[in-house]
Amino acid sequence: MANLDAAFSALADPTRRAILARLALGEATVMELVEPFEMTQPAISRHLKVLEGAGLIVRRVEGTKRPCRLAPTAVAEIDQWLGMLRRALETNYDRLDGVLAAMKPEK
C-alpha cells in the first residue's frame, strides 16, 4: 500500500476515474481512450501517466501501440484499505443498533 496516497490523488480527477472505468471493461489503446472524451491525445496521455505513476494502470509495448490495462494489485490494495474502513463502520452501526434497541420503550 505504498502508493495509496498517489492512488487516491489520481482518483480525485473525474477524467481519470472515467478512464479507469473504461479499462475495467478491458485493455485499450490510448487512441481508444481518447474517443469518448473531448480531449486531445496528449491530454489523455498525461492522465495515463498519472495513473501509471500511481500504480493504477500498466502499459505494455505492442509494436507502435502501448495498450493500457488496470493494475489488479493496486485495485486490490485500495479495496483492502476501503474494506477495513467498511468493517469499522459496520461495527459502529451494529453498536448503534444495539443502543437504539435498548432505548425503545417496552410495551
Image (cartoon, grey):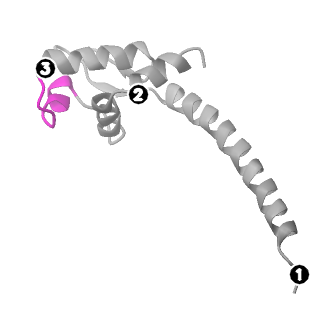
Amino acid type shown at disc 3: Gln
Marks 1 and 3, Cα distance to the nearest angstrom? 66 Å
Identify the secondary structure beneath mark 1: loop
Q: Position of residue 23 (x, y in %)?
A: 32, 35
Q: Is residue 79 magenta?
A: no
Marks 3 and 2, Cα distance to the nearest angstrom? 20 Å
Q: Is residue 24 above or below residue 56?
A: below
Residue 106: which numbered mark, if any?
A: 1
Q: Which residue is mark 3?
A: 41
Position of 107 with respect to 61 (left or right) is right
Quick check: can you spot residue 65?
A: no
Amino acid type shown at disc 2: Leu
Instruction: Provide the residue span drawn in magenta.
Output: 29-39
Mark 2 or mark 1: name the one nearer the start of the chain: 2
Marker count (numbered): 3
Position of 8 with respect to 67 (left or right) is right
- Of labels 3 and 2, the one closer to you: 2
- Of labels 2 and 1, the one closer to you: 1
Residue 45: which numbered mark, if any?
A: none
User: CB of mark 3 within 8 Å of CB of mark 2?
Assistant: no
Mark 1 or mark 3: name the one nearer the start of the chain: 3
Q: Position of residue 26 (x, y in %)?
A: 32, 38
Quick check: can you spot residue 69?
A: yes
Q: Is residue 106 above or below residue 103?
A: below
In the rendered image, which quarter is residue 34 located in? Answer: top left
Q: Nearer the viewer, residue 76 or 11?
A: 11
Q: Which residue is mark 2?
A: 11
In the rendered image, which quarter is residue 9 located in? Answer: top left
User: CB of mark 2 within 8 Å of CB of mark 1?
Assistant: no
Mark 3 or mark 2: name the one nearer the start of the chain: 2
Q: Nearer the viewer, residue 78 or 89?
A: 89
Q: Position of residue 3 (x, y in %)?
A: 53, 16
